[in-house]
Amino acid sequence: MSEPAGYILGQSASAARRLELQDRHFEVPSEQLLDALALRPTDRVVELGCGPGGLTRRIAARLGAGGSVRAVDSSAGLLEQAAKNLAGNGAEKVEFVAADVSKPGAWLDGADVVVGRAVLHHVPMAEYLLGRLRPALRTGTRVGFLEPDFRSPLARLAHLEATGHPEYAALRVWATALNDLYLARRISPAVGATLARSLAAAGYRNVREEWHEFPSDALVIENMLMFYDEVRGPLESYGILSAAENAEQQRQLRALLPGPHPGVWGMFRVVCEA
Ligand SMILES: C[S@@+](CC[C@H](N)C(=O)[O-])C[C@H]1O[C@@H](n2cnc3c(N)ncnc32)[C@H](O)[C@@H]1O
């Protein structure tokens, strides 16, 4: 099997800005995830795929002087953005590590908590990582993930589109383009929906799952527009959407502003113990 290519989405300052906007959009389920993990001030937390540090900042804000976050990512550009983002926001509690999280390593040593937001779906066959992660953790380590899902909401959108809402084609095309892009890169676009089952199959204990859906409001639509800009090149090179189709889809999405409309995506929040 060929080695997976690198992270498909952007790693520049503008991509980091989209992830910052996304952090605000994810505020409620992110804080609920940290509540469900019962974060304690002295916890040693390992975060998988920290990106520009939106969740890292939320974790650091809950830790006391004895607590720490090891924030791991494979993108040097996003780690640099994260360091800037954390300056003055708890940076003294954070250690940044450049590593591929699909290969559990020494960066997991001593973890009381392992957490990841919107990272597993970027890993090829993410289930394999979940299984290999468990023996690398001490029994009782608290583990939690937030993973997006834009496949199950598509069923409702398809029904609405077929029953008097042709304008929702713009939401459907966006979700389909994202799915096709991730499949072309052999990553795991639907891992959120099967995450609880996969964790239980790998022997994690006390697995709990919640679904959190976002209405397609102005913030969500803005994120979708930025996504189209960010991956215009890859969508074109994989034959998923030409630049002209991309521009037309953006026009149709703007016509849906300000919303809200039914959700085009939501997040699975899953917590358990190793
Ligand atoms: C959608 S972003 C989410 C970033 C951050 N967790 C957040 O919620 O704002 C996915 C992140 O996972 C990182 N990533 C993807 N595959 C990775 C891998 N195999 N190892 C380490 N990081 C990875 C990317 O570089 C990117 O920062």
Image (spheres, grey):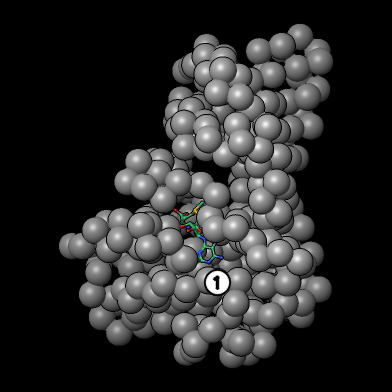
Q: Is residue 264 above or below residue 159?
A: below
Q: Is residue 182 above or below residue 233?
A: below
Residue 106 appears in the figure:
yes
Q: Describe the element under mark 1 as helix, strand or loop.
A: loop
In the image, residue 54 lies at what x, y percent? 38, 55
Q: Is residue 25 above or below residue 33?
A: above
Residue at mark 1? 101
Residue at 49% across, 87% down: 106
Quarter of the view holding residue 21: top left
Quarter of the view holding residue 170: top right
Q: Is residue 157 above or below residue 185?
A: above
The kind of residue tagged 1 is: Val
Residue 19 appears in the figure:
no
In the image, residue 172 lies at what x, y percent? 69, 26
Residue at 25% across, 80% down: 65
Tally of numbered tags: 1
Note whether ligand 1 is within 8 Å of mark 1. Answer: yes
